[in-house]
Image: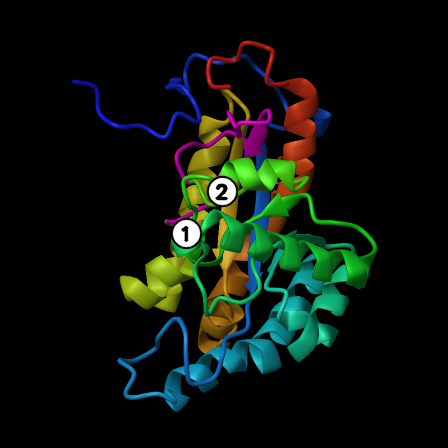
């Protein structure tokens, strides 16, 4: 008896796909997924530095708030210094709480992606009507602020219902994140046509690595460097995507930022060999060169 499946894409080995190169013949594309998130006080979900007590959980709320007040601004200085673009995965609540932070990234030309209303809620548990509303609320807030709807979406808490790809496609999104199943973009089937999945990292992600597995700051930076060096070698055979997922309340802490700077300085020294870009630019380029009807074996 076959196992239940999502039905979104077919199996395709990485070694047997159409060849493509990124702009200027580069083989590795790298993007930074910067999560700018806001949380409700005294209720809802939230990452924890230490086991929380009864609500209001001041310790963990304040720890997360440090990211928006301090950590994100220090990281912005780092990105400016090294001329690194970002895909900003934005909770719409940021536009009410601290719009200055989102605006600073918009001014520098960073991509703004939808990331739900707040990370105090998870979209996978919602009804279809409720999930449509979550996507619509987020999209409208970003469109009103910046004059255009976002092209990409990352679910709060990497959460998708069984209908999320369908709802995103029907809401005008051109690509989704969340899935860490590949090192290349993948065309997903939906009930109204294809939508592209751009790989989103769960290993090079400071929440699983640091907040869950308790990797130290130096080890996390070494992971980024090792992944980058290995993927540069692997990409000689086919174009690959490397993502780094970051949260300012974690890696924006000064002792971690010092090591993160070391990792990004290493990457910046090789910028002529790789495409430092955004998830949206990767999706647009892939859709042009590997459209869903090309017969790539994983549409």
| 286 is within the stretch colored magenta | no
How packed mark 1 is, by other alpha carbons closer than 10 Å (few <14, some 14-19, many 20 or more), is some
Residue lying at 66% horizontally and 25% vertically, measured from the top left: 287
| 191 is within the stretch colored magenta | yes
Kindly state the secondary structure of the residue where label 1 is placed: helix
How packed mark 2 is, by other alpha carbons closer than 10 Å (few <14, some 14-19, many 20 or more), is many
Using the image as rendered, state which of residue 32 and residue 231 is in the foreground. Answer: 32
Residue lying at 54% horizontally and 76% vertically, measured from the top left: 67
The outermost residue toward the front is 129
Viewer can see residue 145: yes
Q: In which quarter of the image is residue 274?
A: top right
Viewer can see residue 108: no
Q: Quadrant of residue 13?
A: top left
Q: Is residue 105 left or right of residue 6?
A: right
From the top left corner, tell me how far across and down residue 18 is, in percent. 54, 12
Q: Do the residues labelled 1 and 2 touch (CB within 8 Å)?
A: yes
Using the image as rendered, state which of residue 7 and residue 253 is in the foreground. Answer: 7
From the top left corner, tell me how far across and down residue 86 is, in percent. 65, 54
Residue stretch rendered in magenta on the structure:
180-202
Q: In this view, does 216 lie to the left or right of 168?
A: left
Look at mark 2 in the image and give the residue it sits on.
164
**Badge 1 or badge 2: first in the primary sequence:** 1
Q: Is residue 38 left or right of residue 272?
A: left
Q: In this view, does 86 lie to the left or right of 35?
A: right
Look at mark 1 in the image and give the residue it sits on.
124
């Amino acid at each position: 008896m076959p196992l239940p499946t999502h039905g979104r894409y077919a199996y395709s080995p990485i070694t047997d796909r159409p060849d493509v190169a990124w702009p200027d013949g580069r083989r590795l594309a790298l993007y930074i997924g910067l999560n700018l998130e806001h949380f409700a006080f005294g209720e809802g979900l939230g990452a924890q530095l230490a086991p929380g007590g009864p609500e209001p959980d001041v310790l963990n709320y304040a720890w997360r708030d440090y990211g928006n007040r301090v950590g994100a601004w220090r990281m912005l200085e780092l990105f400016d210094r090294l001329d690194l673009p970002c895909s900003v995965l934005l909770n719409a609540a940021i536009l009410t709480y601290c719009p200055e932070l989102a605006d600073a990234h918009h001014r520098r030309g960073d991509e703004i992606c939808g990331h739900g209303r707040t990370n105090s809620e998870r979209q996978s548990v919602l009804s279809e009507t409720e999930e449509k509303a979550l996507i619509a609320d987020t999209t409208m807030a970003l469109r009103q602020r910046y004059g255009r709807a976002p092209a990409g979406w990352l679910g709060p808490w990497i959460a998708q219902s069984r209908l999320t790809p369908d709802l995103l496609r029907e809401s005008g999104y051109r690509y989704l994140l969340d899935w860490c199943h590949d090192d290349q973009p993948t065309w997903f089937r939906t009930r109204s046509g294809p939508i592209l999945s751009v790989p989103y990292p769960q290993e090079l992600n400071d929440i699983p690595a640091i907040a869950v597995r308790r990797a130290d700051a130096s080890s996390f930076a070494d992971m980024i460097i090792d992944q980058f060096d290995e993927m540069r070698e692997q990409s000689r055979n086919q174009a690959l995507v490397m993502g780094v997922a970051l949260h300012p309340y974690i890696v924006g802490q000064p002792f971690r930022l010092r090591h993160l700077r070391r990792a990004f300085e290493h990457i910046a020294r090789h910028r002529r060999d790789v495409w430092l870009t955004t998830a949206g630019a990767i999706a647009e380029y892939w859709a042009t060169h590997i459209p869903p009807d090309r017969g790539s074996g994983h549409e």
